[in-house]
Amino acid sequence: MIRVLIADDHHVVRRGLLFFLKTQKDMDVVGEATNGREAVELTAKLRPDVVLMDLVMPIMDGIQATKKIKSQYPQTQVLMLTSFSDRDHVIPAIEAGASGYQLKDIEPDDLVEAIRKLMRGENTLHPQATSQLMKESEPQIELPHKLYPLTPREQDVLSELTKGKSNKEIASSLFVTEKTVKTHISNIFSKLLVQDRTQAALYAVKHGLTEPS
């Protein structure tokens, strides 16, 4: 028998979950908490196998409650059941120790299956939560122009270059010599990690560097 604790500050949600879970022969709802602090206290008292944890609750939110529960009772599985699927909620919840993350629009049969999966040692994440975790795990590659900022003059030259102007025309527009323009363009290529004028122009358009300084 899977012992389940429901933690949600909305009475209607708790009643709905209780009613449905009572129909499952392998599940027993051992308690209900109306906030995160109660969830921690009832976990200590009732030792549930799984806590269905809402994220936003008074007194103590679901993330803080999850941290406390997992630190004191690591064998207790926490399944977040919430309306939020953005990274500001998903990432902290998983970092706090939640083994599952589902949205409240989940089908009841899918919810009980998610609970059973937790008991089998499987993480259960809603697709939207999974996508947020994948974004988080992607390496944050710093763009060349952020690593190697262009000087104001180089920015001016790049702006003129994106207009398709020749070195001579750029020199005339900026009142400098062609030699100076060539030097700036060489520096631009080096900083932006591009090979030619076309690549430089495409980079400038893509990253909003088409305006003069």
Image (tube, helix red, strand yellow):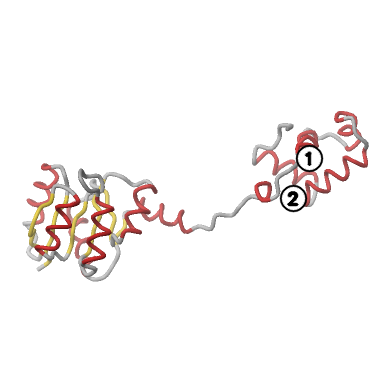
Quadrant of res 23? bottom left
Q: Position of residue 61 (x, y in %)?
A: 24, 48
Q: Position of residue 155 (x, y in %)?
A: 75, 38
The reply to whether discs 1 and 2 touch (Cβ–Cβ < 8 Å) is: yes
Name the one closer to the observer, 26 or 29: 29
Q: Which residue is mark 2?
A: 191
**Residue at the image point whose x is 15% and y is 42% from the top:** 10
In the visual, does 128 lie left or right of 177? left
Amino acid residing under circle 2: Lys
In the visual, does 53 lie left or right of 92? left
Q: Which residue is mark 1?
A: 154
In the visual, does 33 lie left or right of 138? left
Locate the N terminus and report the quarter of the image it occupies.
bottom left
How many labels were placed on the picture?
Answer: 2
Q: Position of residue 25 (x, y in %)?
A: 7, 64
In the visual, does 174 lie left or right of 121? right
